[in-house]
Image (cartoon, rainbow, N blue to C red):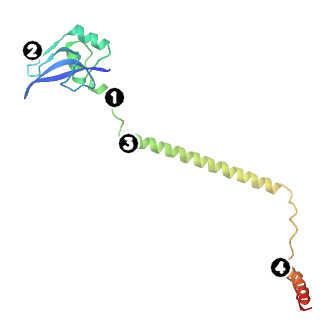
Amino acid sequence: MSLRIRLSRGGAKKRPFYRIVVAEITSPRDGRFVERLGTYNPMLPSDHEQRVTLKTERVEHWIKMGATPTERVHKLLGAAGMMEPFKYNEQPKKSAPGKKRAEREKEEAAKAAMAAEAAKKAEEEAAAEAAAAAAAPAEEAPAEEAPAEEAAAEVAPAEETAAEDAKA
C-alpha cells in the first residue's frame, strides 16, 4: 500500500477549496483517504494566514512512514518550511531527443567493425594457407583415365562378339 499526500478538491464551481489528505495512490482524487492533514484555499491572498493550514506533526509522521507528496503539496510544504522547496529543474527528464537513434547507430557501427575485423582475419588465414601450399613440395597427380575414344574402342569388340553369338 503506497501512500501519497495530495489535494482533494471541494468547494463550488469556480470556487475551489482543497483538503490536504493522505490517500492510497489507487484511490480517486476526491474519494477515500486515510487522514486529513490540512486545507488549502487558493481564493485567499497569498499572505493570508488561512490560505494553507497544516497539522505539522501528522505531516511529519506520514512523511516518515513513507508517504510521498505530490508536486503541488511539496511546493506548499516547502513554503511552510517543512520541506526543502520543490525545484522543477531537478526532476528526472525524459530521454534526450535522438538518444535511442544514437545508441542504435553506435551498435550498428560496432557490428560493422566486428564484421570488418572478421573479414580481415579470414583474409590473413587464406593468405597463410596459400603460402603454406606454395612452400610444400608438389605431390604427384593421380593417374589419368583412358581417353573416351580408347574406352569406346574397347567396348566395340565386345559388342561384335555378342552379335556373332546371337547369329549362331
> Residue 144: x and y, percent?
86, 70
> Residue 1: x and y, percent?
32, 20
Depth check, mark 4 against mark 1: the one in front is: 4
Depth check, mark 4 against mark 2: the one in front is: 4
* Residues at marks 4 and 2 touching, judged by CB atoms closer than 8 Å: no
Query: Which element carries disc 1, helix, strand or loop?
Result: loop
Q: Nearer the viewer, residue 4 or 91?
A: 4
Q: Is residue 90 above or below residue 95?
A: above
Q: Earlier in the sequence, mark 4 or mark 2?
A: 2
Which residue is disc 1 drawn over?
92
Residue type of the residue flagged with mark 1? Pro
Which residue is disc 2 drawn over?
48
* Residues at marks 4 and 1 touching, judged by CB atoms closer than 8 Å: no
Depth check, mark 3 against mark 2: the one in front is: 2
Instruction: Kindly report the distance in space between the C-alpha atoms of the residues bearing marks 4 and 2.
Output: 117 Å
Checking the image for residue 152, the label placed there is: none
User: Does residue 77 appear left or right of residue 93 in this picture?
Assistant: left
Q: Earlier in the sequence, mark 4 or mark 1?
A: 1
Tell which residue pokes out farthest to the front in this image.
Answer: 168
Which residue is disc 3 drawn over?
98
Residue type of the residue flagged with mark 3? Gly
Depth check, mark 3 against mark 4: the one in front is: 4
Which residue is disc 4 drawn over?
148
Q: Is residue 36 above or below residue 158?
A: above
| Label 1 CA crowd tier, 10 Å (few <14, some 14–19, many 20+) | few
